Amino acid sequence: MKKLILLGCLLISSAELLAQQFLQYNTETVYDSFENPSQRSFIRDTTRKFAFNFFFPSITTNGYLTGNVQQTLVNRLSNAQYDNSNLQIGEGKRNYLNLNINAYLFMFKVYLDQKGDQELGLSMKLVGEGRANVTDETIALFNGGRDFGMNDYSGVFNSSGAAQVYQQYGLSFREKVTPRLALGIKANFLLGVEQHKLNVTRSDLAIDRAANTATFSAKGSYYKTGRTIMGLKNPGLSVTLGGTYLYENGMILQGNIKDLGFIYWGDEPSRVSIDGTVVINNFTSGQSEKNVDDKLSGLINRSPSNSKGFFTGTNGLAEASLSKRFWLDDRHRFRAFPTLLLQKQLFYDGITGVLMSHFQYNKFNLSVSSSYDNRNLFAAGMQFMYKAPNFEVFAGTERIIQTRRLASSLMSDKIYNNTAYTGADIFLGMSFKFGYPIESPANSSFVPMGSEGPGFLGRIYNKIFKGSAKKVGEMERY
């Protein structure tokens, strides 16, 4: 139980770190090329050979909190007091928390060869994944017996939650295998930092008002590990695959399978079988939160456990998008780039549809987005980006309304009321290109790199599809 409320606090207290999920699509930034490996980040006769973020982190994440407990948790953090007036005690109402954080600490790319405009990249990022399915009663329990009108409750505390943090070291490769098709792959070696997973399948609460005590019993499981920086005993692997196809009418189809993998947790692993009862004293006192926290932690820690390692999956995603560029003037200064995107979580029920567009004037870009998911959550976002051939910087939010409202509530003492959901996004990133300019053979002032014809992925593509991946450099506009 303690871990569930901590997950909720993590979501709210990390609001200033939350960032975008979709608005970097089709921007051709270095960040975009690592997240969507079939995307290019170099353009012949325009950019230089190397790209680097100089350890300036590019942060992206998405998170939300739904249900009745929004008001309770936000007010607990901002005002140090519970406001459970919207909780429906005794009905087992569900609340959902979701948090994913990606922080690229290192990004480096090199333009390898003109055969397929090959790009090779190295990256290191810190990943956090958290989710919880928690009832109103679970959160209300930490405020003691004030909100429990009956003396006996059964099953309404059944909740679950999981969180894991790991490092990802990636090697990416992108190649244009035909004049219309580009493929990319990013292979990742993972090192786990910390993991927690709690699942309560049976729960009961009996209140003795005369003695000011409550007897709580629960059954379930709890997986956890120690916290480590190196994570050598928590290895894992994942892969991201991507493809981009340009149709004759200018439409661009892009598909990705992202972060499909696993982690083996072998550093201080613990698998706890929860099956016990605790008595909570002073159930209605001003110290009820500490009393409940201590007792529930004791219930988990005293349960039988073993130290055998275990596996967890990473939050794999499947994505498909359709987009097209439109120049709005004859001099090619104004450009619109609308994109329709669908994303599906591979191991969970999350589905999100996104409609967005980039508007470019020379080196300045304004992007807007709207998204809607299967939990009926709507979000509107905006991104500002300055993108020169060899320098790019961007910042924005994908949840303008929610970010503003949450920030205002946390900085004031006003009561926060429930909405469709609570969330916040703030994202930023920057990178540079340097080295020799990439010049096509016809424009080269020195010996060009490589020759026209298929590269490594192009040769594999030809063997599989019996095609001909030649003259890949004929179509430079995607």
Image (cartoon, grey):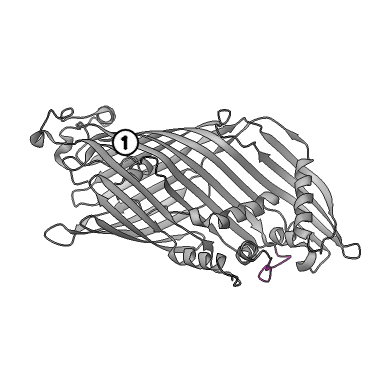
- Start-end of magenta stretch: 82-91
Residue farthest right in this picture: 210
Instruction: Name the residue tied to disc 1.
Output: 109
Assign a secondary structure to mark 1: strand
Of residues 392 and 467, the one nearer the viewer is 392
Residue 271: x and y, percent? 70, 36
Of residues 145 and 433, the one nearer the viewer is 433
Q: Is residue 177 visible?
A: no
Say above or below: 397 vs 346.
Answer: below
Amino acid residing under circle 1: Lys
Q: Is residue 44 magenta?
A: no
Residue 72: x and y, percent? 65, 65
Please name the residue shown 59% across and 53% down the image: 10
Magenta stretch prevailing secondary structure: loop
Please name the residue shown 63% across and 42% down the image: 196
Please name the residue shown 34% across and 36% down the image: 108
